Image (spheres, helix red, strand yellow):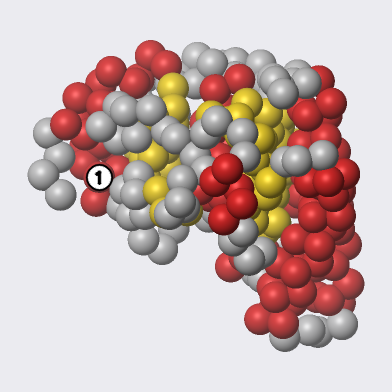
Amino acid sequence: MPVTPDDHALAARLARAAGDLLVDLRSRRTAEGADPGAMKDEGDRSSHDLLMAGLAERIDAGDAVLSEEGKDDPVRLDRSRVWIVDPLDGTREFGEPPRSDWAVHVALTIDGTPVAGAVALPALDVVLCTSPAPAPPPPAPTRPRVVVSRTRPPAAAVHVAGALDAELVEMGSAGAKAMAVLRGEVDVYVHSGGQYEWDSCAPVAVAVAAGMHCSRIDGSPLRYNNADPYLPDLLICRPELAGPTLDALASFSG
């Protein structure tokens, strides 16, 4: 079954609903003086439960799901349509109010390719989705900006920044970093420290729909719904910076 308008709408609706739940939960638990660790655990669990309930009808129809917070069911490897979700991307940032660099990811893959998806940035009241796709960001500044983790900047990203004479911008979750490219806040997102499929599937779906370049750091295509969901590296950037960035990465010795 090909991707449908309902798939795009469902991804956006679920990302929005999970984000609203998390914003409310964080506000209430913070006011109550809850332990940050307990609040993060509750956020992961509550968002996962909401997403699974929202996908139940699609699962009954034959779709499968891979969620960071769920038990991996190998039946997904035999299904064409697989939803890949991260109920709370950036758990650390979620547990540090008022940080806004955390996200909810909902994506549909067909035969390993992300075809529909949404990324909610709940603390900003923003949802970016594949339909309607985000408008292209404004032209890049003369000096590009490379977004990196605020705690563990990947050496490859630092190398790219040096090669492009770019500014380094620190940010939290993978979804927040990827959407910062679409929002015109940064221009290149390079990750080489290893992630999992749920960390990037929805961001890649939305970024591709918006006309951004998305690939592995060697330029090869990104494929999802693999038996091992570990994904070693990722590049999301403005299309005009793809060539220079990949050239810089090719010279990176690690």
**Residue at 30% from the left image edge and 27% from the top image edge:** 219
Residue type, label 1: Ala
Q: Position of residue 91 (x, y in %)?
A: 62, 65
Q: Nearer the viewer, residue 97 or 91?
A: 91
Q: Is residue 31 left or right of residue 159?
A: right
Q: Is residue 183 visible?
A: no
Q: Is residue 234 above or below residue 155?
A: above
Q: How many marks?
A: 1
Which quadrant is home to the N terminus? top right
Q: Position of residue 240 (x, y in %)?
A: 38, 14
Q: Is residue 17 left or right of residue 230?
A: right
Q: Residues within 10 Å of mark 1 (few under 14, many from 20)?
A: many
Q: Position of residue 199 (x, y in %)?
A: 53, 50
List the residue tagged with mark 1.
Answer: 156
**Residue at 69% from the left image edge and 46% from the top image edge:** 64
**Quadrant of the rendered structure where residue 69 is?**
bottom right
**Residue at 60% from the left image edge and 48% from the top image edge:** 76
Q: Nearer the viewer, residue 202 or 190?
A: 202
